[in-house]
Amino acid sequence: MISTNILEKFREIETPFYYYDVEVLKSTLDVLKKESDNSGYKIHYAVKANFNPRLLKIISSYGFGADCVSYNEIAAALEAGFNPSEIVFAGVGKTDREIESALKADIFCFNCESIPEIEVINELASKQNKTAVIALRINPYIEAHTHKYITTGIEESKFGINTWELEEVLRKMSGFKNIRLAGMHFHIGSQITRMSVFKSLCTRINELQEWFITHGVSLDIVNVGGGFGIDYENPEKNPAFGDYFSLINELIDLRPGQTLHMEPGRSVVGQCGSLISRVLYIKNGSQTLFAIIDAGMTDLIRPALYQAYHKIENLTSNGNIYRYDVVGPICESSDTFGKYIELPETHRGDLIAIRSAGAYGEVMASRYNLRNLAKAVFSDEL
Ligand SMILES: *Cc1c(COP(=O)(O)O)cnc(C)c1O
């Protein structure tokens, strides 16, 4: 909740800006910590959801690991105090330089997405006289029932190794002297809200466990990835990690010596962030009232990119309710945060909050139209 006290402070700040409620973040992390301590599961926060250094520091202070998709993310994670022995490195297109740097940093594990990538890691590890620990990102062919741009576990996706390639991986392993195959990894998509999707994943994991055992391979890492969704309709609601952990605990058949790893991103940081903007103009169309605000798709691209819903609130009006198309200033029609949104009568100068913007918000900002990047403001620094 944005209190009147904080609202007074907002009036002094140049808009648009990202507002991070540190209390919300910490209450989310407290629950995650409790669940992971109880279950023994290892958490690797997916840095790509938000790499703001202040947030990374808070998250690392809980003792969690990090999931990175570029070497720059690994460097940011190290800078924020994450332990290299808790860092996993995913991505379909790791460059030689990134692999070399990650090997030098002695990260925990490479989550590998193709056979040619494993060959390159083997080669580069041999040059450093090291053994790279890898997990295979396996494509489990599960429909995530989310937007197609954030669905990653179906057959013709660029992500992951197909199950029909696993025999070949094992055949080649004997030639890979500088690789230790330690685990299997999955990540089937993002903003998954149907628990049945995770159920299917658990079933698939158990089948693959059997497959590896019959092929004489014992793995110590089972990494279920991220993807746990948040409730964009109810920004005050923290993710129900308890349900997710119980489901995994109940359904995945872990073998002796195995550790379960998770890579939550959105669910960790999504609800703690809001994009705060000012209304520039109210424009009367023939049918539509447009509220033109000073934040645009360059600050928060999710609605333009994935037709994503974010709750929009007018923080400074309590007039009669009207319906508005809330749009940004960018020269693109897709620069729309919401159509036909109910808001109290809105005027130039009103403050607008676009909620649940902590994940894939600030980090996806661009300078298109040569706009300034929105600054970050933290609740405990106001
Ligand atoms: C993006 C990503 C995550 C985090 O996904 P969320 O939906 O934000 O939880 C986890 N693992 C991998 C490999 C990813 O690419």
Image (spheres, grey):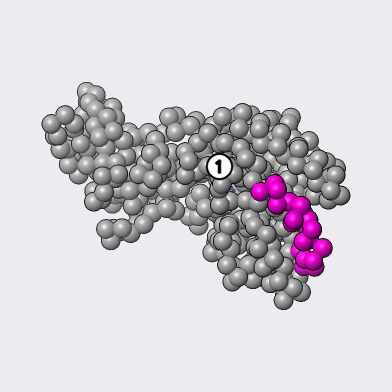
Amino acid carrying label 1: it is Gly
In the image, residue 251 lies in the stretch drawn in magenta:
no
Give the residues drawn in magenta, as a range: 162-182
Q: Write the residue at 53% across / 42% down.
A: 151
Q: Which residue is most to the top?
A: 320
Tell which of 219 and 108 is nearer to you: 219
Using residue 303 as the reference point, say whether residue 266 is left or right of it.
right
Q: Quadrant of the N terminus?
A: top left
Q: Give above or below for 340 relative to 161.
A: above
Q: Counting other residues with Cα less than 10 Å from the Cα at mark 1, is it few (<14), some (14-19), or many (20 or more)?
A: many
Residue 23 can be seen, yes or no: no
Q: Position of residue 216 (x, y in %)?
A: 86, 49
Q: Residue at x 49, y 51 (%)?
A: 50
Q: Measuring from the top left, give residue 252's x and y in whole percent.
A: 74, 35
Residue 95: x %, y % from top left: 57, 67
Is 170 placed left or right of 44 in the picture? Answer: right
Find out if the beta carbon at label 1 lies less than 8 Å from the nearest ligand 1 atom.
yes
Q: Is 229 on the left-hand or right-hand side of 377?
A: right
Q: Nearer the viewer, residue 268 or 378?
A: 268
Among all residues in the image, which is located at the extreme bottom?
127
Which residue sits at x=52%, y=53%? 48
173 part of magenta stretch: yes
Q: Residue at x 72, y 58 (%)?
A: 134
Above or below, 227 relative to 219: above
- Above or below residue 156? Residue 170 is below
Whether residue 23 sits left or right of residue 301 in the image: it is: right
Front position in the image: 198 or 92: 92
Residue linked to disc 1? 189
Q: Quadrant of residue 194?
A: top right
